Amino acid sequence: MSEITKAANEDYAYLKENIETLNQSIEAACRDSGRKVDEIHLIGVTKTYEPDVINASIRYGIREIAENRVQEITRKFEAISTDVEWHLIGHLQTNKVKYIIDKVKLIHSVDSLKLVEEIQKRAAQINKVQEILIQINIADEEQKFGIQPDDLPQLLESISKMNCVRVVGLMNIAPLVENVENLRADFKQMKRLFDGLEGLGYSNVKSEFLSMGMSNDYRVAIEEGSNMIRVGTAIYGKRNYTGGC
Ligand SMILES: *Cc1c(COP(=O)(O)O)cnc(C)c1O
């Protein structure tokens, strides 16, 4: 290891500690619920953080990262280690699909037929099969993106006719609550919807990833069946939103 890398690693020692603590906590949640640790995908949510910090977290074992804005992916993409897979977890406007279609492994936040049609079109242009999750507004919050559970069958039926899009699971964003125990019912309902995907019999709809759980609620989410958690604060620290948004 070069002197420069060594010095940089020392600056980011807190990341190493945070990631170790998080991994222990994930292990404990798995133990408590009879889950296997290696089933759980830990995604580092890197929004507002700069490439130097993100690359340090990759050196400490983060293998998948997520941003919630297209501009952040395009801005940082070239500066980030190639040892990582990119996820988009925020609302995606149809006219921005073209900027990220060649960069992201998984789009978590798909919530309309119009958006899937654009993803199909852009994926076809680059001979890619784009993996997506359908975002469900399970708590039925007014200000949130995501479709209602009742609208899922029809959306999946439409997607089943597309050849460059593959639905690999579901995602939700839980509301901020004081007591995370109150989220169990929603997480359970997500798991039921997720388990129902395979039974639809569509060749491009699979139940591989249930993306639920963030810094506050990932333990409960894992206990209720999540296998993909999106963790920002617990790895990188509290975000400082000065960049305007
Ligand atoms: C910011 C964000 C997260 C991570 O939130 P933390 O509470 O910092 O862990 C997860 N999912 C989505 C969709 C986000 O926008």
Image (tube, rainbow, N blue to C red):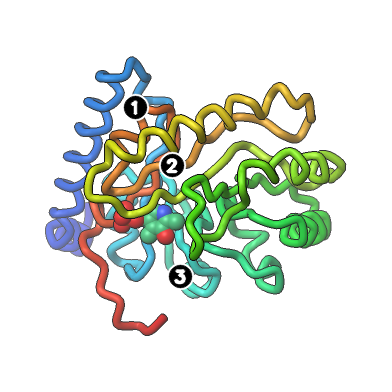
Residue 136 vertical placement versus 99 (above, below)? above
Mark 1 or 2, nearer chain start: 2
Horizontally, residue 40 falls left or right of residue 77, namely: left
**What residue do we see at 14% from left, 54% from top?**
14
Q: Where is residue 203, by image quadrant? A: top right
**What residue do we see at 31% from left, 39% from top?**
182
- Can residue 125 be seen in this snapshot? yes
Residue on which disc 2 sits: 212
Residue 112 position within the rendered picture, expressed as x and y whole percent measured from the top left: 70, 57
Looking at the rendered structure, the secondary structure element under dot 2 is: loop
Residue 201 position within the rendered picture, expressed as x and y whole percent measured from the top left: 78, 24
Q: Where is residue 33, by image quadrant? A: top left
Residue on which disc 1 sits: 223
Looking at the rendered structure, the secondary structure element under dot 3 is: helix
Outermost residue, right direction? Answer: 161
In this view, the residue in front, 224 or 123, is: 224
Q: Is mark 3 within 8 Å of ligand 1?
A: no
* Pointers 1 and 3 in contact (C-beta within 8 Å): no
Q: Amino acid at mark 2?
A: Met
**What residue do we see at 58% from left, 54% from top?**
146
**What residue do we see at 48% from left, 56% from top?**
141
Residue 221 position within the rendered picture, expressed as x and y whole percent measured from the top left: 36, 35
**Label 2: few (<14), some or many (≥20) within 10 Å?**
many
Residue 101 position within the rendered picture, expressed as x and y whole percent measured from the top left: 67, 60
| Residue 106 circle label | none
Q: Within the displayed image, which quadrant is ligand 1 positioned in?
A: bottom left
Nearer the observer: mark 1 or 3; the answer is 1
Q: Amino acid at mark 3?
A: Lys
| Residue 76 circle label | 3
In this view, the residue in front, 217 or 53, is: 217
